[in-house]
């Protein structure tokens, strides 16, 4: 079941540097939001806060109606949040085959061994990798690795998924294909998703709402068309200008 | 330059191995008769068994501890690592001496039962395992810290910390674990001081007896080391298969403080277990300190030139190893021709039991024309370079492999030749890695007994040999005092080295 994600007045400091400064963001259950901002703007930090891999210095992270992190403490462990991830470098475990990567996730979520094979087969078929079960990540092409990472994130039907610029290393054609596939997969499942990118064109391809991050805060949220018509800042105007 | 470094490496490491074959040809079939009796084979089997047992126990202690120290929120884990790791910088027989002061019949905690357990094969395995476990711990911990953080994070969002450790981190550091096991096995198989002190007959002692003991017969010694050659080759083959060029991260590792995983309810029992292992490492050193107290005021009379001999020979060897390591390690990391062979030779010399390497070194250098080497501290330097060159080669190779090739390519395109690139680009960029290689070579040379006891020059005995020769019939407090002096010398070297390396960071 999809879960809503809310960050309320979140601050994050690394030493004296404020990475996030009273940031609030709300993603409804089943909604897909593209989080857009320049490099170093704190996009990845937001994902790590949602995943529970770090705690906010101040403020609250809510998953559904559960307070997951608050004021320097991680209250719900990463493995108990039901939030899947696709990292920028994909982080496929190199010592496990495609089947092993997916099986590890299902096993960790307590899926019975007998049921895993069928679920793995189904998701791999869906992403077009049915014949690659026994391959190691090192034996796959860049696009295939991307599909494995997406399959690994979705195989357990997570409550939400976060993606940290997963397509940045691919050529435009392949990126477009994968975005379309990802859009379909999320729509089929109604999964909540935060898609981080520095490229607002990817939000267009996903056809989702956009949240623009600047100076440690969300400066504007809404449909792409709204951002284009009434940009809240010069930065947003510059971003949407890329779309022509 | 690679040719020069390679020539030094071949002279130091390959010549003694080849000389062993020459010695056999010279002594003829008579010497081989020593292998016709069952005794040497029994001793060899026992030595292999003790080395295997030591490796197994050290891996069982070191693997979980390495993972916990590197990635779990354990109280005072840096201090624990330091306390646990320090004994690996010491000659193992010093720690056996410490255990004797603790568990021997007259020891602080001793009884007939503890003494019987200590002076047995199980005692040898126990002492060596506690001594060498830090090698496993440290290589596993460094390996875990070198694992890409996102691999761990991707697992943490679906699995418990325990499952992440056992299913993701430990498999990811298999090459580090394999390397640790090979190093521990090779060191345990070479070990002379601990089994001799604990009165357990082993193969290296039989070789040693024929070179300097009552059964003096150098020809037989050459024949005796023959069965060790296939063992060394098997270890080399294992190393090539399981570790080889895979990088065991020594640079580019994560900081330990980067969001360690919680231990939850297991925190207290895990902390207690980890600190018990840490205490096992510290206990023999504490016992030595306690026993040495009465002799400390007169220690200078017994030390003589030994500390200076140790420092001089080890420092010279470390510098040579540092240079060889930089040149061959860089070549190995960049896949230059011949580097793989030189790397293999360095590994072979290290995994060759010290008795075999020592007999070969004697065969090469104990002749009139090379008396200027064999009769002086230079022979210790040659011996240390032969045995420990691999430390410099591997540490430097890993460091270089983690720096972008573009740095050198940019220098090359700006007109810098190979030597200039090596000295002006590769060395400064990898100063920390090369410094670590030099420090490790220095410490390994300082702790060496097995090689140096076979050919130390007259009046040039290092600390380890001085303590080892006094161990049998010296006053216990004096021997403990000398051991404490060695511990202090090593601690000072490690501390100064660590400070210098930290400055470079």
Image: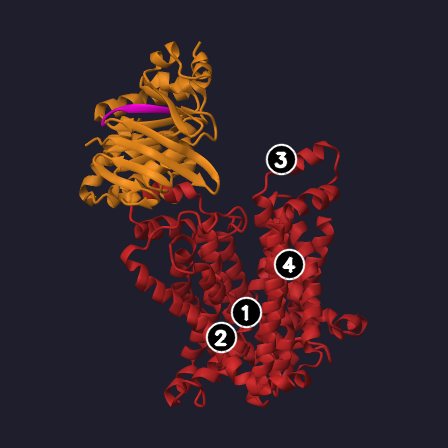
Chain colours: A orange, B red
Establish if B474 lies above or below B20: below
Callout 4 touching callout 1 (CB < 8 Å): no
Q: Residue B254, how many percent across, how many down?
A: 48, 47
Asked whether, in this view, residue B145 is left or right of residue A161, the answer is right
The lab-note entry on whether marks 2 and 3 share a chain reads yes
For mark 4, name the chain: B
Circles 2 and 3: CB atoms closer than 8 Å: no
| Image quadrant where one finds the N terminus of chain A | top left
Q: Which residues are magenta?
A: A29-35
In the rendered image, residue A185, in percent from the top left (x then y), is placed at 27, 25
Q: Are marks 4 and 2 in contact (CB under 8 Å)?
A: no
Given residues B207 and B57, the one toward you in this image is B57
Q: Quadrant of residue B223?
A: bottom right
Q: Earlier in the sequence, mark 4 or mark 2?
A: 2
In the rendered image, which residue does mark 4 sit on?
B438
Residue under mark 2: which chain is it in?
Answer: B
Chain letter of disc 3 in the image: B
The residue carrying mark 1 is B228
Q: Say what secondary structure mark 1 lies in.
A: helix
Is the Cβ of the residue at disc 2 closer than 8 Å to that at disc 1?
yes
Residue B31 placement: quadrant: bottom right
x then y, percent, for residue B38 = 48, 80
Residue at numbered disc 2:
B44
Q: Tell me if residue B474 can be seen.
A: yes
Please state the horizontal and vertical placement of residue A95, each as a whole percent of the image: 39, 45
Q: Are marks 3 and 4 in contact (CB under 8 Å)?
A: no
Taking depth in this image into account, of B58 and A114 the one nearest to the observer is B58
User: Looking at the rendered structure, which numbered label has been put on residue B406?
Assistant: 3
The answer to whether dots 3 and 1 both sit on one chain is yes
Marks 3 and 1: which is nearer the front?
A: 3
Count residues near mark 3 (Cα–Cα under 10 Å), then give few for <14, some for 14-19, many for 20+. Answer: few
Alpha carbon separation for disc pair 4 and 1 = 28 Å
């Amino acid at each position: 079941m999809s879960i809503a994600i809310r960050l309320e007045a979140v601050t994050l400091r690394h030493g004296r540097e404020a990475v996030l400064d009273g940031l609030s963001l709300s993603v409804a259950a089943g909604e897909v939001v593209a989080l857009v901002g320049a490099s170093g703007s704190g996009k990845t930090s937001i994902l790590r806060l949602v995943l529970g891999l770090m705690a906010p210095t101040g403020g609250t992270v809510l998953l559904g109606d559960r307070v997951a992190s608050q004021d320097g403490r991680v209250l719900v462990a990463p493995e108990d949040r039901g939030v899947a991830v696709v990292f920028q470098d994909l982080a496929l475990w190199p010592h496990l085959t495609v089947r092993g990567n997916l099986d590890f996730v299902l096993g960790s979520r307590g899926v019975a061994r007998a049921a895993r094979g069928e679920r793995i087969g189904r998701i791999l078929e869906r992403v077009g990798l049915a014949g690659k079960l026994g391959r190691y990540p090192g034996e796959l092409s860049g696009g295939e690795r991307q599909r494995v990472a997406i399959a690994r994130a979705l195989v357990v039907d997570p409550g939400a998924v976060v993606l940290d610029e997963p397509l940045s290393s691919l050529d435009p054609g392949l990126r477009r294909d994968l975005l379309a596939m990802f859009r379909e997969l999320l729509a089929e499942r109604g999964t909540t998703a935060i898609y981080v990118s520095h490229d607002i064109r990817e939000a267009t391809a996903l056809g989702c709402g956009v949240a623009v991050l600047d100076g440690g805060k969300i400066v504007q949220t809404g449909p792409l068309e709204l951002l284009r018509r009434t940009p809240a800042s010069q930065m947003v105007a510059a971003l949407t200008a890329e779309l022509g | 330059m690679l040719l020069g470094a390679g020539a030094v490496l071949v002279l130091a490491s390959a010549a003694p191995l080849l000389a062993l074959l020459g010695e056999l040809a010279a002594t003829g079939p008579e010497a081989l008769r020593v292998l016709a009796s069952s005794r040497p084979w029994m001793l060899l089997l026992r030595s292999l068994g003790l080395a295997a047992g030591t490796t197994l126990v050290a891996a069982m202690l070191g693997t979980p501890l390495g993972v916990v120290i590197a990635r779990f929120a354990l109280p005072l884990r840096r201090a624990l690592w330091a306390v646990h790791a320090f004994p690996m910088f010491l000659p193992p027989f010093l720690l056996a001496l410490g255990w004797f002061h603790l568990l021997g019949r007259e020891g602080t905690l001793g009884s007939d039962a503890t003494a019987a357990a200590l002076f047995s094969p199980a005692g040898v395995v126990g002492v060596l395992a506690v001594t060498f476990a830090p090698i496993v711990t440290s290589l596993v911990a460094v390996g875990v810290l070198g694992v890409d953080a996102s691999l761990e994070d991707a697992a943490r969002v679906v699995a418990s910390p325990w499952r992440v450790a056992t299913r993701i981190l430990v498999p990811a550091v298999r090459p580090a674990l394999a390397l640790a096991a090979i190093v521990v096995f090779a060191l345990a198989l070479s070990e002379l001081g601990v089994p001799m002190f604990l009165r357990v007959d082993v193969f290296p002692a039989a070789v040693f007896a024929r070179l300097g003991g009552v059964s003096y017969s150098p020809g037989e010694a050459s024949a005796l080391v023959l069965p060790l050659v296939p063992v060394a080759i098997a270890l080399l083959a294992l190393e090539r298969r399981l570790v080889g060029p895979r990088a065991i991260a020594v640079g580019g590792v994560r900081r330990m403080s980067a969001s360690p995983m919680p231990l939850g309810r297991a925190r207290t029992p895990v902390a207690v277990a980890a600190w018990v292992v840490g205490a096992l490492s510290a206990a023999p050193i504490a016992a030595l300190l306690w026993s040495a107290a009465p002799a400390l005021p007169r220690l200078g009379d017994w030390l003589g030139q030994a500390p200076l001999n140790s420092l001089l020979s080890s420092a010279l060897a470390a510098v040579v190893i540092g240079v060889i390591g930089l040149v061959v390690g860089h070549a190995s990391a960049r896949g230059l021709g011949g580097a793989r062979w030189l790397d293999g030779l360095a590994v072979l010399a290290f995994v060759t039991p010290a008795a075999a390497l020592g007999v070969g070194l004697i065969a090469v250098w104990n002749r009139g024309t090379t008396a200027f080497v064999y009769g002086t501290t230079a022979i210790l330097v040659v011996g240390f370079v032969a045995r420990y060159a691999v430390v410099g080669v591997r540490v430097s190779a890993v460091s270089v492999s983690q720096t972008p090739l573009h740095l050198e390519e940019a220098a090359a395109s700006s007109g810098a030749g190979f030597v200039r690139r090596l000295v002006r680009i590769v060395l400064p960029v990898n100063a920390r890695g090369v410094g670590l290689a030099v420090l490790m070579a220095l410490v390994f040379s300082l702790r060496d007994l097995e090689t140096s006891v076979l050919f130390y020059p007259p009046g040039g005995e290092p600390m380890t040999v001085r303590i080892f020769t006094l161990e049998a019939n010296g006053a216990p407090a004096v021997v403990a005092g000398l051991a404490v002096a060695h511990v202090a010398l090593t601690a000072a070297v490690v501390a100064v080295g660590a400070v210098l390396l930290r400055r470079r960071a």
